[in-house]
Image: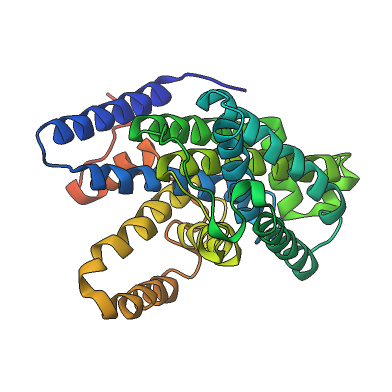
Amino acid sequence: MFSLGKRNVITISLLAGLYLIIQLLVSRGVLLPYDLQILGLVCVNIMLAVSLNLINGFTGQFSIGHAGFFGIGAYASAYLTVIHDIPFLLALVLGALFSALIGICIGLPTLRLKGDYLAIATLGFGEIIRVVILNIPAVGGARGFSGISRETTFGTAYLFMIVTVVIIKNFIRSKHGRACIAIREDELASEALGINTTLYKVAAFTIGALFAGLAGGLYSHFMGYINPAANQIGFIKSIDILIMVVLGGLGSITGSVGAAILLTLIPEFLRGLAEYRMIVYPIILILIMLFRPTGILGGKELSWDAFVSFYQRITGKKQCQGVSTDA
């Protein structure tokens, strides 16, 4: 299921090089601690977008309660480190596993639904999680959970982001991922071919919940504080994640990565516009969706072959394949 081919080696080398460049910029004072915090949030949002794309884009199940799993992971890991003094990495893993367990419990009954009914069910789940957290005094209730140790560094978030993307990408390329894509294309035909559609839908839902919970744990230990507001673990956050997936392109991992980067950085670039920021930001989104209604990549993936082909088109160079001469 996991392979380390030439392209993967090149990709990993580029990612490692990017990390070293960022660290060099930090050491030279070009990037400030605040900039690293924004880059850490970019990594968290990439994890959320890619994990939701597995559910919505590759399996074809319309979920809009992804922030609920994000909140479960955030609060569970924070509770374990603050209240029970459990080491950060262990708490992070346990929080993600707890989120996955809830994903199984929610997925089994709700994934029998389809279309709008599934969307409403997952939306209700997300709001139930938020309301439950609001009424748990042990995690701060409506005041939020403070005093969380800020264990997550940019390097930690960057590493887990890469792990998330690699695992989900390899899952999609496996026979299990192909089964999920078959379900998306035609669920009835998939059942006729002997694919256990319920099993694969729940599996995709659980994997998505696992990585959303992992992102939540990283986030709470990155910020040192989390509260059950709608824009952190509620409906607004779920919509933000969904926008990243749709904007990048349903069924496109690289599209989700690009959209997560774009939608995390745009508000920061517009911060200086103050009162105009909330006008400019929606206009940008509307323009993108008007000109690219299927998303930035529209279900396609950026690849080395695509870059080579693009380079050849703009330079007028062509590969000489199968050229023969007759005497």
Q: Residue at x 71, y 34 (%)?
A: 176
Residue 104 percent location from the top left of the image: 79, 42
**Front residue (pair 56, 268):** 268
Q: Where, quadrant-wise, is the C terminus in this rendering?
A: top left
Q: Is 71 on the left-hand or right-hand side of 226?
A: right
Residue 324 position (above or below residue 128): above
Q: Residue at x 41, y 45 (%)?
A: 223
Q: Residue at x 28, y 30 (%)?
A: 19
Residue 316 percent location from the top left of the image: 20, 47
Q: Where, quadrant-wise, is the N terminus in this rendering?
A: top right
Residue 172 percent location from the top left of the image: 62, 37
**Front residue (pair 79, 58):** 79
Q: Is 137 on the left-hand or right-hand side of 325?
A: right
- Residue 177: image quadrant is top right
Q: Is 165 on the left-hand or right-hand side of 107?
A: left
Residue 309 percent location from the top left of the image: 32, 43
Residue 149 position (above or below residue 299): above
- Residue 94: image quadrant is top right
Please name the colour scheme applied to the rendered image.
Answer: rainbow
Q: Is 123 on the left-hand or right-hand side of 281?
A: right
Residue 257 position (above or below residue 236): above
Q: Residue at x 56, y 26 (%)?
A: 85
User: Can residue 252 be seen at all in this image of the molecule?
Assistant: no
Determine the residue located farthest toward the front in the rendered image: 137
